[in-house]
Image (cartoon, rainbow, N blue to C red):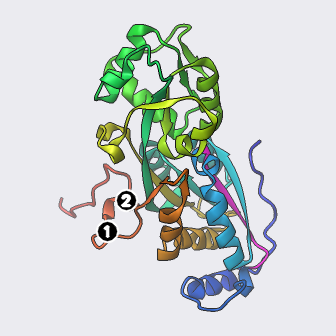
Amino acid sequence: MEYRRRAFLGAGATGVAAAIAGCLNSSNDGNEGSIAGAELALATTTSTYDTGLLDEINAEFQDRFGVQVAANAQGTGQAIESARNGNADVILVHARSQEDEFMRDGYGVNRRDLMFNDFVVVGPSDDPAGVGDTEQATAAFEAIASAQATFASRGDDSGTHTKEKVIWSEAGIEPSGEWYQETGSGMGNTLTVADESSAYTLADRGTFLSMQDNIDLEILLQGPIEGGPELLSNPYGIMAVNPEIHDNVNYQLAMAYIGFFTSPEGQELIENYTANGQQLFFPEALSEDPDFQQYVPEDWQPDSGGE
């Protein structure tokens, strides 16, 4: 069900902005007074929710600021559509092409690189398609299609589904037939379906690791974190919804959330979050050499000013 925002319950915009100006560097304990009672509408991906990372971050943010975070976990495409409709203050997603379109259309502002992990190709241990013998994502998908081995696709316009379609395209394959099954659901449920069907699927490493003890699937092709192909990289971005498009969005609180998530404290929470003894996400917001391109669509170039 799509999130529908509540009326703003906290202080006015001036009070919120003044509070935020000192919040992130405040040494005071307890809630940050003048934004207490506000609610942040967050549209995000199922992977951040299924891994439990959001629970960790949001609990700290809510305790620090005295606010509530209403998180709506969907596929990236659905999360972005919610924001387009004015039903989110901030989005946390992982499909750069869709993020770029969202910004070009004027809906998103103040984008920041947040963190990354990678995708992995997982499947049954007997590996009937021989995916474990491949070294590239395209070769892995070619092997699955050639064997017509069951493949569980999210089929939900999520960041994972977007990446999957890129791999099929680069492999020159249009998957179809009984062996190709679309679940139309999140990563956790798709992994469960793949497990029950002894199927292959593309998964983000974080969600797979968080569920590893409950499913009988194995990583058969690693992503770049473990030396695999760069095509399986999985960066996450966060951005505020443009208040000039939707005047009901809580822009000040959205920027407080982005500030907390990308601060040293937020990045440390990401770095220290583990499942089964393994780090699920890698912080990317802090750098000695910040990348300007993170704030704008990847193919955008400044006007040279020439005639």
Q: Amino acid at mark 1?
A: Pro
Cα separation, mark 1 vs mark 2, equals: 9 Å
Q: What secondary structure is the stretch in magenta mostly built from?
A: strand
Q: Specify the amino acid type for callout 2.
A: Gln
In the rendered view of the protein, which quadrant contains the C terminus? bottom left
Q: Is residue 205 magenta?
A: no
Which residue was labeled with disc 1?
290
Q: Is residue 4 above or below residue 262?
A: above
Q: Is residue 40 magenta?
A: yes
Which residue is located at x 50 percent, y 40 percent? 159
Toward the bottom, the furthest residue is: 28
Disc 1 to disc 2: CB gap under 8 Å: yes
Q: Give the image location of residue 119, x and y in percent.
A: 43, 39
Q: Quadrant of residue 145?
A: top left
- Reply above or below: 291 against 215: below
Name the residue that disc number 2 marks: 294
Magenta span: 36-46
Mark 1 neighbour class, 10 Å CA radius: few under 14, some 14 to 19, many 20 or more:
few
x and y percent of residue 263 in the render?
A: 49, 74
The one nearer the camera, 177 or 206, is 206
